[in-house]
Amino acid sequence: MGKCIICGASVDGRICSSHEEDVVFEFRGNDPNQLRSNRFYTGIVDGYADFGVFIDLSPNVTGLLHRSELDRRLESLDWEPGDEVFVQVKNVRENGDVDLAWSIRQAEREFRGVLIQEGTTEVEPDEDDDEGNSDGGSGGSDTGGTGDTGTVTHKPSPDRPDNAEAAEPDAGNDAEAAESDTGDDVERTDRDDENERGPAHAEATSQEGSTGQEGSTDDIDAVRERKQATPEGAGERVDIGTLSDRVGESIRIEGEVVSARQTGGPTVFELRDETGVVDCAAFVQAGVRAYPEIDVGDIVRLEGDVEVRRNEVQVETEALAALAGDEAAAVERRLADALTDEARPDGVSVLGDHPAIDTVGDELLDAAESVRRAVIESRPIVVRHAATADGYVAGAAVERAVLPLIREEHAKSDAEYHYFTRRPLDEPVYDMDAATKDATRMLQDRDRHGEQLPLVLLLGTGSTVESQDGLDLLGVYGAERVVVDAATADPEIADTVATLVNPGLAGAETGDLTTGALGSVLAATVNGDVTDDVAHLPAVSYWEGTPETYADLAADAGVDAERVSELREAVALEAYYQSYQDKRELIADILFDSEGGDLAGHIAGQFREKLETEVDTAEANIEEREVDGRTFATLDADAYSHRFDFPSTTLLADELQRRGDRDATVVYGTDELYVRADGDVDVREAAGDAAMAVPDASVTAVGVRQGRIEYLAGRRDEVTDAVVDAVAGQLQ
């Protein structure tokens, strides 16, 4: 029985329940189930994902602070990997996942006390220090896991310090530890975890002890100078792909540096050879850049010890040097030859038998090679697609193909979140707004985290001249751009991007081809293992007139016509809500989860209910007119639709045209309108004719794929009439 450190009440432990949230805990357990919900804990930032921040609460326990728990935008956080932060544990799930909440208190002084939680037992810091030194040793026994679970021995991660002391190593203790270390794998306490930083750190701390100074610049430079020579003495070069079988061995590897990131502890170089990728931690001093002369793209030779950290293979770097001349050229040749052999698919995968796809076989192979090459080279892949059912189907198909390749290539368990991002577009054009956002993110990732510039893959967008400015902005920085679009592209785009997959530009008839179908073929070509997974997706991308070849393909995959409709409608509804989010897991559950409940059917029911309500309201207020023998329906969307609820104006216009017995439908709002017609309509030409008829209205065709025309709000009625006349003339 103890007393509460705040109120003095008798408690089992050191804090009463009423004051539990007034103190912050340093967790020294090894099991997430030892954590207590609602308690505040210190943690170390591990890394970022699109959906939040991973926080290490101990070397063996990591939690997720989801972006929805933040009191600010995720992008505005100034936390860096290795930073000490304060978070609250919300929940520990049955599978061991830890949900974290934001803490407005981000300093120890803002709490009323500090306690150490060893397993499930709380002790005060001074008391813990006494216990840790009770045997007179210098850290030979581990006190980090006592309590209900007994003694736990572990090694802290070399990626970052486990507590604030790691950033301020004690010179005397480190020198003593360095002198007594014979190279054997010994157990150490958490408090001596500085000695776990690897050989480079052991050397640095030994120097600190000999001079009596703590991390002086001369000491660091001395360590660096000794490491400049080409590494030697570790035997023959080994392949990175074999490192999982060499844990505990000293090895030599050669390859290309694909990223270099500075943590609060070591510098972590990501090294690639022809067989795989591995993280290599190099330590000089906490937060100090090791080997500053080594840059991303350098060909290097590295010696070190193979370790396992958090179930992932990692190399603790002893020596690292850039190669030059014939040595570098030999490595580059090995990488280039292996990359070409691995990245280029043998041929285009067959999904159905659409003649238009046969015209772009070489371009599909080029696009697939670009995707596979980006994975192998550890370049991020950014997929941009329209926030429509067709766009989501195309994006999800490629995602399904690429994620397994990333998992195979990278040892890190969260690599798929770092190297693949899918960002839906509200607009059908890849404009300067979208390009600026992508350029900002890729430059931040390059400068802050040492990442390479991404491959930007645009599906069903980016193929018209309205996207040229945005594509050119990425081109200024040398980011590779690949465009895949079923609708006929503008010829200018072929000269703007690395690869353009466009059957229409190749001379094929593409009236009944969707980007979802084309994207599914690309996905199967990128990764043949997912061919069966994506076989039903081409059919899902069609609202009507599904080609028989794709309907049969879906049926063969066990997805009948009714189920295809449910999948399409469910994706369309979810594409509307939070349209700028990828909703990766939700979309995957809808399209690929054949077990575990009828999610798609449930969402499709909501789709139909909301759509029917909106269509009934719209049809009751449609204005019918006849122009040059052609029947038109026009609808004032501002007055007779719920503009900020499902369905979107574009989907409503589609549905009205599909259901109505008319030649064309025009749905107009304050300063934009949408044209739908049974025949071919050139929206740019219609906008040009309307601009001549109403010259002071600033009429512009903005979204050719979307049939969208913009104008000045004050001239809405005149522009609507002019567009109807122009469309009627084209339908003659």
Image (spheres, rainbow, N blue to C red):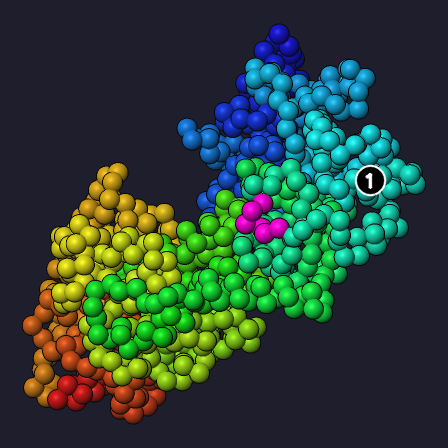
* Residue 120: percent from left, percent from top: 57, 19
Left or right, 201 with reference to 239: right
| Above or below for 205 versus 255 | above
Q: Quadrant of the N terminus?
A: top right
Nearer to me, 88 or 558: 558
- Given residues 107 and 518, the one toward you in this image is 518
Task: Please identify the quadrant where the C terminus is shown.
Answer: bottom left
- Residue hosting label 1: 205
Asked which quadrant contains residue 579, the reply is bottom left
Asked whether residue 660 is drawn in magenta, I would say: no
Q: Main secondary structure of the magenta part?
A: helix
Residue interval drawn in magenta: 238-243
Percent position of residue 138, x then y:
80, 24
Residue 427: x, y in percent?
36, 68
Q: Secondary structure at mark 1?
A: helix
Inspect this view and state whether residue 501 appears.
no
Q: Is residue 642 left or right of residue 697?
A: left
Amino acid carrying mark 1 in the image: Thr
Residue appearing at x 60%, y 41% in the figure:
246
Residue occupying the point 41% across, 51% down: 404
Q: What residue is shown at x 76% (from left), y 57% (from top)?
A: 230
Q: Is residue 464 visible?
A: yes
Residue 241 placement (x, y as % from top left): 54, 49
Taking the view exactly as shown, the residue that stands out farthest to the right is 211
